[in-house]
Image: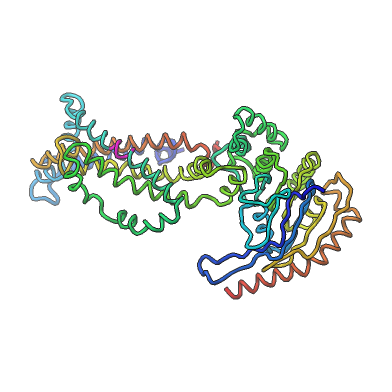
Amino acid sequence: MTLLDRLKPRPGNLRLWQVGLLAGIFLVWHVLTTPGLVPPLVFENDQQAAFFFGEPLKVAGRIWRWFVTEGDIYAHLGVTLLETVLAFGIGALTGLAGGLWLALQPMASALLEPYIKALNSMPRIILAPIFAVWFGLGVASKVALGVTLVFFIVFFNVYQGVKEVSPVLLANARMLGASPRQLLRHVYLPSATSWVFSSLHTSVGLAFVGAVVGEYLGSASGVGYLIHQAEGVFDINTVMAGILVLTGFALALDGAVGRIERRLMTWQPRGGETEKL
Amino acid sequence: MTAPALQLQDVACTFIDRHNPAARYTAVAGVSLTVGAGEFVSVVGPTGCGKSTLLNVGAGLLQPSTGSVTVFGQPLDGINRRAGYMFQAESLMPWRTALQNVMAGLEFRGTPPAEARALAGDWLRRVGLGAFGDRYPHQMSGGMRKRASLAQTLVLDPDIILMDEPFSALDIQTRQLMENELLDLWQSKKKAVLFITHDLDEAIAMSDRVVVLSAGPASHPIGDFTVDLPRPRDVAEVRTTPGFIALHQAIWAVLRDEVLKGYQQQLQVKAGA
């Protein structure tokens, strides 16, 4: 095997390549924005690239000060995470309950269908100012915004999942003596879970969107508030740092959902369970 | 005289087309069918003649448009609690292991978990899956899934067993094995069985009586043959006996025209569509 072959992306060195790609992006960012390193290509002078895009070293320094030397981000991060988790939890649970209920009530679902469609196609971010008026500038208005985003994703997936339960499976469970309650618990719910989990990955991200956009539009704490403050004084490095921190935590939450999914969905076939030697 | 296990009297089923409420399709009409307690009755007929419809009526999953259904002399209302149903399609719950699937019916009926587990394990061993209780359906072969389905149905000890082409998806060797197993189980328990199949050989080899349905629409019984071959039978060996061949010829003479008729109708439907 030549050196070149060994360096090619393959399952064994995938992680290395992923980290390398990240490092590469930061390197390009660094080279293109640090004043004086390369002659200005697009801008009139070499200060402007740094002004518009920030400098990765200063961004890293900001994050370091937030988390280590000054340690002042934890309160803000705590608020944002609390809002996200609450919005996610409440939205997912109500979406699950609503989807199950409506899928099993054909008349109600026919009656409500145009309204649900309207609510879903409405750009719900626009509700943020209304929620701020209703619930104040604290945690509640952000949670409310996140819930409206999460609810519909989960709701539609559960609704679809219940609608697509195999009729043979249902008939079989009924012949085995399942009551309507047992059908719900042992057939509809497990059958809808795979749909629920695929929606949860999307909705974790949206819960974050709800929290941060809510903070951005009006609040006194949270990472969105920090970003908004920094933007007010054109401190692009802090804005970038805030974005990176949020991305990291969104990834972590998504990973947590994935872990729970793998534990609960052991019954699902996974492509190719053999090992190639 | 004891009442028959399952009796369909003058049953007709008319379906309404969901997309075109004016269009109606009468699957079966004027069907009277009796399965005595402990009797093994097969229903054969051309494809699409409404065999499964009849079974669903007997199971209580489908209300007949006209006619009546009685179970051990009682009129049937809702699901037939004394019947077990083995479906043609996959019917195991994919999120339950083989053991949990077999336990499901007992669990639904409120059997204590320990007792249910013991009974289900016992039945898994009887269908040869004793070592596979912790497998999920996707980890089992088609034949193993059918065995698990069989155990799932029989663990409830139903008085009537309804089977809708249960072995049609299996290869011929596995199929004969399972047919013999089913006959053994039936022989020891003597339940009433209503067995739907399109395979005449299978019907004769297994049954006490074979009922031939006409081609649809509005299909109805056009022949009723008593199979007086000695038991216990081996489904592979019985096929070569003179009695089997004579019966096969007699039933096939009735069935053949209907099969051709059914085939012609399907061609026409295709051409018209």
Residue B262: quadrant of the picture: bottom right
Residue under the point 80% across and 63% down: B223
Residue under the point 68% across and 35% down: B124
Applied colour scheme: rainbow
Closer to us: A102 or B265: A102
Magenta stretch: helix, strand or loop mostly: helix
| Residue B168 can be seen, yes or no | no
> Is A70 on the left-hand or right-hand side of A83?
left
Task: Identify the magenta region.
Answer: A84-89
x, y percent for residue B246: 89, 60
> Is A6 on the left-hand or right-hand side of A143?
right
Residue under the point 64% across and 54% down: B56
Closer to us: B155 or A219: B155
x, y percent for residue A31: 19, 41
Closer to us: B12 or B266: B12
Closer to us: B61 or A26: B61
Q: Which quadrant does the C terminus of chain B fall into?
A: bottom right
| Residue B47 can be seen, yes or no | yes
Residue lying farthest to the top in this orientation: A69
Residue B95: quadrant of the picture: top right
> Is A129 on the left-hand or right-hand side of A271?
left
Magenta stretch: includes residue B169: no
